[in-house]
Image (cartoon, helix red, strand yellow):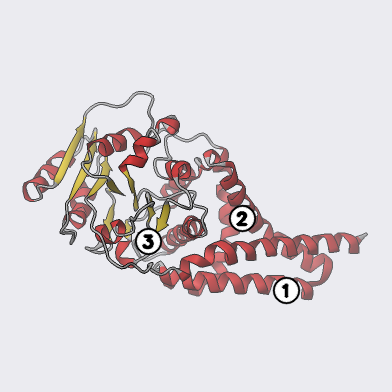
Amino acid sequence: MLMSWGLVLFVAFCVVAAIQIFYYGYFFRHVGAWKPPAKEASRQHPVSVVICARDEDENLARNLPGVLVQDYRSTHEVVVVNDNSVDDSRYILEEFQKTFRFLNIVELQQEAKLIAGKKYPLSIGIKEAKHEVLLLTDADCVPASEHWIYKMQDAFRDGIEVVLGYGAYQKLPGFLNKAIRFETFHTALQYLGYALAGKPYMGVGRNLAYRKGLFFRNKGFSAINHIPSGDDDLFINKVASAANTTVVLDPDAFTLSRPKTTWKDWMRQKNRHYSTGKYYRRGHQWLLGLYTTSYFLFYPLFAAAAIVYDWRLALIPLALRLLTIGLVWRKAMKRLGEDDLFPMFLFWDLWLFFYYLIFAPAVWKKPKKTWN
């Protein structure tokens, strides 16, 4: 009986390892292999950059200049929705507007009833935008280069309505910073990898572009207004397809954000983000759930198979999986500018087991009605 159970555990371990290898070989390898598509000519579209801010005077003062001084000669505007701020945001924006006439300030002085989170101010900003191509970011983000607008809008062509970008976090000292950046990398590996494989399921509001017409054809956020989060991932989950979505992974097209500085704040942020996953399309829930479950089971099954069955045989699936993941992570981390994380590759692999253990309950929690 002991041997039969050992064989069952070993087979289960091999199946889980095979699932992991499949995900990395079929979906995630595309991130590291990404190259800009060959184009005969570049086109400069009129662009509206839309930013929502609530009590973000320091972030606006620090980051908005990076958006306003973009090297983009074609028609564009920057729309900032000041959502019921009680700090000095209004005065900072008015000072910027004296120099940058293409800065459009939208002052909201009343809360929207029954519409939780960021969706109402973002909807107003999109409605006020003059141009068809919308480029979204947050007040706590700054473009990684002066070519951000150009690189993101250049991905639009006939049939493309959604462009997914990478929103990185600034590199600071300390383990928490590395943990935040690794989690951001791993999340990007999934949503960018799925999109490049023809299965787009989300984007991040720190760096995201889509057509205004797409927004209004789908009645904006009306289907998800009751959910506090989801103005980026749930909306993209609804409207994105293999045919209308593309990805830009040029370092000049990244945005940079200041990461949380305490574990408590970061965990609160991640719990809020993960609470929207249960609203994804069923197919996407299944794909994401299978990957997460396989990751969660891998090391416990390895330990069980090594102890109960044969540790020498158990090392074979372990080695194959680690080799596959290591190759994919190395290339993808280099592509996304996170290659300083790779020396801790084995640690991050084990870290993900505990990460999923900590944040799994967030999937079933009711989202809180805040967005900042």
Q: Quadrant of residue 361?
A: top right
Q: Amino acid at mark 3?
A: Val
Residue at horizontal 59%, vertical 56%?
354
| In this rendering, position of residue 86 left or right of residue 351 | left
For mark 1, does the 10 Å Cα neighbourhood hold few (<14), some (14 to 19), or many (20 or more) residues?
some
On residue 216, the disc is none
Kind of element beneath mark 1: helix
- 226 lies above or below 273: above
What residue did someone put label 2 on? 291
Q: Marks 2 and 1, Cα distance to the nearest angstrom?
A: 21 Å
Q: Position of residue 329 (x, y in %)?
A: 51, 69
| In this rendering, position of residue 246 left or right of residue 289 | left
First in sequence, mark 2 or 1: give its number: 2
Q: Marks 3 and 1, Cα distance to the nearest angstrom?
A: 38 Å
Q: Nearer the viewer, mark 3 or mark 1?
A: 3
First in sequence, mark 2 or 3: give its number: 3
- 40 lies above or below 241: below
What residue did someone put label 3 on? 248
Q: Amino acid at mark 1?
A: Leu
| In this rendering, position of residue 280 left or right of residue 248 | right
Q: Marks 2 and 3, Cα distance to the nearest angstrom?
A: 24 Å
Kind of element beneath mark 2: helix
Kind of element beneath mark 3: loop
Q: Quadrant of residue 19?
A: bottom right
Q: Nearer the viewer, mark 2 or mark 3?
A: 3
For mark 3, does the 10 Å Cα neighbourhood hold few (<14), some (14 to 19), or many (20 or more) residues?
many
What residue did someone put label 1 on? 315
